[in-house]
Image (spheres, helix red, strand yellow):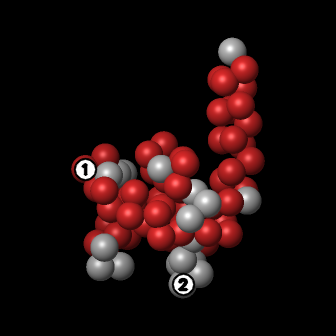
């Protein structure tokens, strides 16, 4: 049960801190918002490393939401 609460807490804290700090600074707030749900769902443990996060999203291309996939395509990823 503790693991559940730890994960729930991470889901609340991580998006507001780590994700915002480790993404490509060239991305707009709106662009980051497109992939945030996918990053949390598929790449939670990569959020502390921008390069690893981008690679994780690329590796999970088949599981990305349409908006995030479109963003990756327009960015050449």
Task: From this view, report whether residue 9 is shown above or below residue 55.
Answer: above
Q: Position of residue 59 (x, y in %)?
A: 31, 56
Q: Is residue 67 visible?
A: no
Per the model, the C-alpha gap separating discs 2 and 1 is: 24 Å
The residue located at (56%, 65%) in the rendering is 49
Q: Position of residue 34 (x, y in %)?
A: 48, 61
Q: Nearer the viewer, residue 34 or 49?
A: 49
Q: Nearer the viewer, residue 16 or 28?
A: 16
Rendered image: mark on residue 30: none
The residue at the far top in this view is 1
The residue located at (47%, 70%) in the rendering is 51
Q: Position of residue 38 (x, y in %)?
A: 45, 50
The residue located at (46%, 63%) in the rendering is 52
Indicate the quadrant where residue 69 lies: bottom left
Disc 1 on helix, strand or loop? helix
- Count of numbered marks: 2
Rendered image: mark on residue 62: 1
Disc 2 on helix, strand or loop? loop
The residue at the far bottom in this view is 26
Rendered image: mark on residue 26: 2
Mark before the other along the chain sequence, 2 or 1:
2
Q: Which quadrant, please, contains the C terminus?
A: bottom left
In the rendered structure, are the residues bearing label 2 and label 1 in contact, judged by CB atoms less than 8 Å apart? Answer: no
Q: Position of residue 71 (x, y in %)?
A: 37, 70
């Amino acid at each position: 049960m503790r693991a559940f609460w730890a994960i729930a807490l991470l889901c609340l804290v991580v998006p507001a801190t780590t994700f915002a700090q480790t993404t490509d600074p060239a991305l707009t707030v709106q662009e980051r918002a497109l992939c945030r749900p996918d990053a949390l769902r598929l790449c939670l443990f990569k959020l502390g490393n921008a390069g690893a996060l981008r690679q994780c999203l690329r590796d999970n291309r088949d599981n990305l939401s349409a908006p995030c996939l479109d963003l990756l395509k327009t960015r050449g990823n």
